[in-house]
């Protein structure tokens, strides 16, 4: 099992702010630093690490390095306790004079930031696709529940407010699914096109927001039962919250879309 290690205690949304260093040690890198919120961090056999191979700041001089986790100096500092997604582990990792062969550098040294950004496009689209399936499942479970649950002498689903709201959400989910399919079809033709970057960011943004709305609405329509641990919707409500943060927060997606729509001021000089 592997892990992707980009985020640091001092740099999450702003990936250009990472400070983990991979210094020149002859035929090896000497790696020092720390990574935060790393999924699979406690059990990974290898970590795909973004680190600075050239001193400095900004986007330049970063590389992606494959790090076997049995390398001396690799430390799982802490297993983190999360609001949701309890079936996956998330950890703080520390690297203390970790010596990794330079042959473990992926692609061209110094191009790590750009390769990482490409990986994020795939991760964001895959995240949106799997979230779409999850939100439809949560909604259909809720529809089944509301067909059975009686109040005021009739099944709850017979309330117009309730079935209208459910149908609105089904429509939004279907619209997101089609956006996902369209983006995937363009990505299959050219993964690096700016249109794909923009659309994948839109898929991720919409998925995060819609998952929150679906989770909140489904929990509400379950009433007290929705607040109980035994009901799958309470787990969905917790788990779905991550989508607007992990893999790039909603605001970061909005920033990418704004940039590709040419709405931003000129970039600061590095
Ligand atoms: C459960 C979990 C698993 C994760 N797994 C991994 C992993 O495997 N590997 C990995 O590298 N990282 C992982 N992450 C980290 C995740 O990618 C970051 O948490 C995320 O990118 C946000 O960074 P941050 O937490 O440092 O938030 P910050 O950068 O501190 O931002 C905080 C908030 O500020 C707002 N914000 C940020 N920038 C802007 C802006 N420009 N304009 C307006 N508002 C803004 C957003 O609302 C954001 O949520 C994981 C996180 C969690 C919670």
Image (tube, helix red, strand yellow):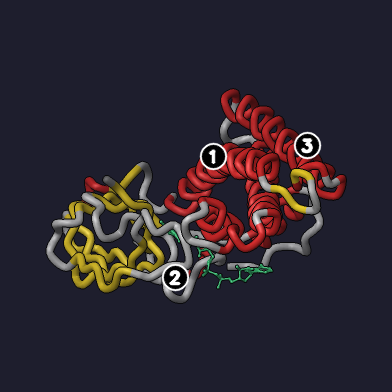
Going 21% across and 68% down the picture, which residue do you hit? 75
Label 1 CA crowd tier, 10 Å (few <14, some 14–19, many 20+): few
- Say if residue 125 shows up in the picture: no
* Residue identifier under label 1: 130
The CA distance from mark 3 to mark 1 is: 17 Å
Q: Disc 3 or 2, which lies upstream in sequence?
A: 2
x, y (%) of residue 61? 43, 59
- Residue 37 placement, left or right of 105: right
Vertical order, 149 against 175 (above or below): below
Going 75% across and 44% down the picture, which residue do you hit? 155
The CA distance from mark 2 to mark 1 is: 37 Å
Q: Residue 56 carries which label?
A: 2
Q: Are marks 3 and 1 in contact (CB under 8 Å)?
A: no
x, y (%) of residue 254? 71, 56
- Residue 188 placement, left or right of 32: right
Q: Disc 2 or 1, which lies upstream in sequence?
A: 2
x, y (%) of residue 135? 61, 44
* Residue identifier under label 3: 171
- Looking at this view, is 16 or 233 the one in front? 233
Residue placed furthest toward the front: 153
- Say if residue 139 shows up in the picture: yes
The CA distance from mark 3 to mark 2 is: 48 Å
* Helix, strand or loop under label 3: helix
- Ligand 1 occupies quarter: bottom right
Locate residue 184: give its quadrant. top right
- Total numbered circles: 3
Q: Nearer the viewer, mark 3 or mark 2?
A: 3
* Helix, strand or loop under label 1: helix
């Amino acid at each position: 099992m592997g892990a992707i290690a980009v985020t640091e205690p001092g740099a999450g949304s702003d990936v250009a702010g990472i400070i983990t260093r991979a210094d020149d040690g002859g035929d090896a890198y000497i790696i020092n630093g720390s990574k935060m919120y790393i999924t699979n961090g406690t059990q990974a056999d290898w970590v795909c690490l973004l680190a600075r191979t050239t001193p400095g700041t900004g986007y330049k001089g970063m590389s992606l390095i494959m790090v076997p986790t049995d390398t001396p100096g690799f430390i799982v500092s802490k297993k983190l306790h999360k609001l949701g997604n309890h079936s996956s582990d998330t950890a703080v990792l520390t690297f203390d004079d970790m010596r990794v062969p330079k042959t473990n550098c992926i692609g061209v040294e110094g191009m790590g930031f750009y390769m990482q950004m490409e990986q994020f496009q795939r991760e964001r689209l895959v995240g949106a696709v799997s979230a779409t399936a999850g939100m439809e499942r949560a909604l259909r479970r809720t529809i089944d529940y509301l067909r059975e649950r009686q109040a005021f002498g009739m099944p709850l689903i017979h309330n117009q407010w309730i079935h209208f709201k459910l149908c609105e959400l089904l429509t939004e989910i279907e619209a997101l699914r089609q956006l996902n399919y369209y983006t995937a079809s363009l990505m299959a033709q050219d993964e690096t096109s700016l249109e794909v970057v923009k659309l994948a960011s839109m898929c991720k943004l919409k998925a995060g927001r819609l998952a929150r709305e679906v989770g909140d609405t489904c929990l509400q329509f379950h009433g007290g039962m929705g607040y109980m641990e035994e009901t799958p919707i309470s787990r969905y409500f917790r788990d779905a919250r991550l989508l607007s943060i992990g893999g790039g927060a909603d605001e970061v997606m909005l920033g990418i879309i704004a940039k590709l729509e040419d709405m931003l001021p000129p970039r600061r000089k590095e």
